[in-house]
Image (cartoon, grey):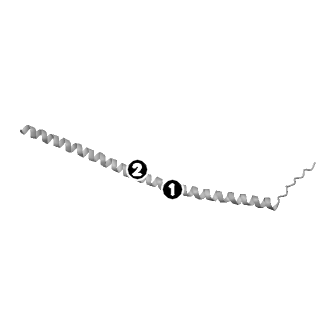
Amino acid sequence: METTTETPAISADEFQALEQKVLRAVEIVRREREARAAAEADAAELRAQLEALTAASNAAQAQITTLNQERETVRQRVEKMLQQMDELV
């Protein structure tokens, strides 16, 4: 038994239509790759900004903690001075 495989003939119009579809697909893939690269660059920039803001936030929080401690120390000293003044009167 011999099996023959015949390939269907493709007309020039069908080939041209197929070629156009392939070219459109290639263009879509190219645009999507460019969009992905741009999105990745944006994400990297946003990560860097987030790290900078996090560092600034941590520094501000540390400064607030220090200022609150200093304020409490001053409050205690003022209360002590007021008590001493009351004792004098």
Amino acid tagged 2: Thr
Please tell me the numbered disc located at residue 54: 2
Residue 15 pos. (x, y %): 78, 60
Badge 1: residue crowd in 10 Å (few <14, some 14–19, many ≥20): few
| Relative to 67, residue 22 above or below | below
| Relative to 66, residue 16 above or below | below
Q: Nearer the viewer, mark 1 or mark 2?
A: 1
Amino acid tagged 1: Asp
Q: Which residue is mark 1?
A: 42
Residue 35 pos. (x, y %): 58, 57
SS class, disc 2: helix
Residue 21 pos. (x, y %): 72, 58
What residue is drawn where x is 24% and y is 46%? 70
> In the depicted view, which residue is nearer to us: 31 or 54?
31
SS class, disc 1: helix
What residue is drawn where x is 67% and y is 59%? 26
Quarter of the figure with residue 20: bottom right
Quarter of the figure with residue 12: bottom right
Mark 1 or mark 2: name the one nearer the start of the chain.
Answer: 1
Q: Is residue 38 left or right of residue 72?
A: right
Q: Quadrant of the C terminus?
A: top left
Residue at far right of view = 1
Residue 60 pos. (x, y %): 33, 50
Q: Is residue 24 left or right of residue 80?
A: right
